[in-house]
Image (cartoon, helix red, strand yellow):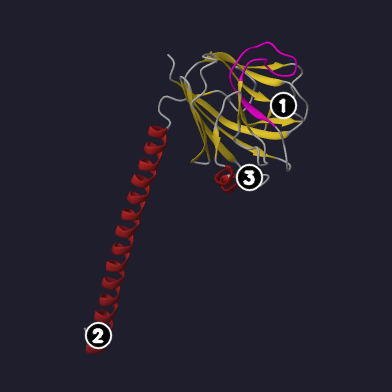
C-alpha cells in the first residue's frame, strides 16, 4: 500500500472507531434513560396504587349504576363525568355507610354555583333528604361549611385552595364516629366533632340549580 493511501486508510479507520465509540455511548445512555423512566414510572404507579389501597370506585364514568335519581334530580353521566345542569333533587348512593373516607373531584362551570355532598342521609324528604349532614360545595365563602353539625371552617385557607371556574378540585372527607375532617385539594379546611346524631346513611350529591361536574368518586369503607 502506498504511503498516502495508508494515511487515508488510517484516518478513515480512526474516524470509524470514533463513531463506533460514540454510537455505543449514545446507546448505553439511551438504555439508562429508558430504564430510569421505567422504574420511575413504576414507582409512581405503585405509589398511586398504594395511596388508593382499599378504595372502591362509585362512578364508572359511563352510567349512573350504583346511584338513584331522587326527587327529579337532573344528573347525567356524559363524557366520562357526572354532570349537573341545574334543577333540584339529589343523587343517592345505592348503599348506606357509617364510617368512611370519601374522595371525589368536582368543578364549577359558573361562578356562585350551589351544591353539597350529603353524608349519612335518609331517603325521605321533599327536594333533599330530611335528615343528613352536608358538606357545602359552592364556590363562595360558604365553601366547606358542614351543615347539621357545629364545625370550624378556615375560610381564608378554603378560598386560597379553591380553584377557579372550570378547574378540577378534590374533596377528601373522612368521617369516623362523631368526627369529620374535610380536605380541599390536600389541605384540611373544615372539621367537626359533633357528627353523633346520625350514625349511618346514604351518600348524596345535591342539586340546587347549580352547574357542576364530578368525577373519580371513590370510597374506603371503614365501617365494615
Tell me whether the residue at label 3 lies in contact with that at label 2, contact meaning CB atoms closer than 8 angstroms. Answer: no
Q: Indicate the secondary structure of the residue bearing disc 1.
A: loop
Q: Is residue 129 magenta?
A: yes
Q: Which residues are magenta?
A: 115-132
How far separated are the C-alphas under marks 3 and 1? 20 Å
Q: Which mark is residue 207?
A: 1
Residue 80 is at least partly visible in this image: no
Give the percent coordinates (x, y) of residue 121: 60, 16
Give the percent coordinates (x, y) of residue 68: 66, 16
> What residue sits right under mark 3 in the picture?
167
Please state if 2 lies on the left or on the right of 57 as rendered. left
> What residue sits right under mark 2 in the picture?
7
At 68% across and 15% down in the image, what residue appears?
Answer: 130
Secondary structure mostly seen in the magenta stretch: loop
Q: Earlier in the sequence, mark 3 or mark 1?
A: 3
Q: Residues within 10 Å of mark 1 (few under 14, many from 20)?
A: many
Quick check: 189 above or below 74? below
Q: Residues within 10 Å of mark 2 (few under 14, many from 20)?
A: few
Please state if 105 lies on the left or on the right of 9 as rendered. right
Q: Residues within 10 Å of mark 3 (few under 14, many from 20)?
A: few
Quick check: 7 above or below 40? below
How far separated are the C-alphas under marks 1 and 2? 86 Å
Q: Hey, which quadrant is residue 124 in on the image? A: top right
Quick check: 119 above or below 156? above
Report the mark closest to the observer, 3 or 2. 3
Give the percent coordinates (x, y) of residue 191: 51, 32
Amino acid at each position: 500500500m502506498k504511503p498516502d493511501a495508508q494515511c487515508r486508510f488510517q484516518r478513515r479507520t480512526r474516524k470509524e472507531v470514533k463513531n463506533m465509540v460514540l454510537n455505543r455511548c449514545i446507546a448505553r445512555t439511551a438504555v439508562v434513560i429508558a430504564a430510569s423512566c421505567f422504574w420511575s414510572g413504576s414507582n409512581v404507579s405503585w405509589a398511586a396504587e398504594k395511596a388508593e389501597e382499599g378504595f372502591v370506585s362509585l362512578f364508572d364514568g359511563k352510567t349512573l349504576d350504583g346511584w338513584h335519581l331522587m326527587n327529579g334530580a337532573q344528573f347525567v353521566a356524559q363524557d366520562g363525568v357526572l354532570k349537573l345542569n341545574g334543577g333540584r333533587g339529589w343523587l343517592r348512593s345505592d348503599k348506606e355507610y357509617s364510617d368512611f373516607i370519601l374522595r371525589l373531584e368536582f368543578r364549577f362551570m359558573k361562578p356562585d354555583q350551589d351544591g353539597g355532598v350529603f353524608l349519612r342521609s335518609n331517603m325521605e324528604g321533599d327536594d333533599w333528604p330530611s335528615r343528613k349532614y352536608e358538606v357545602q360545595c359552592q364556590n363562595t365563602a360558604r365553601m366547606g361549611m358542614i351543615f347539621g353539625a357545629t364545625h370550624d371552617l378556615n375560610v381564608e385557607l378554603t378560598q386560597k385552595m379553591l380553584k377557579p371556574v372550570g378547574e378540577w378540585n378534590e374533596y377528601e372527607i373522612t368521617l369516623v364516629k362523631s368526627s369529620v375532617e374535610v380536605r380541599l385539594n390536600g389541605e384540611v379546611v373544615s372539621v367537626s366533632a359533633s357528627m353523633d346524631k346520625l350514625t349511618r346513611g346514604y351518600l348524596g350529591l345535591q342539586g340546587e340549580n347549580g352547574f357542576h361536574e364530578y368525577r373519580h368518586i371513590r370510597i374506603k369503607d371503614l365501617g365494615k
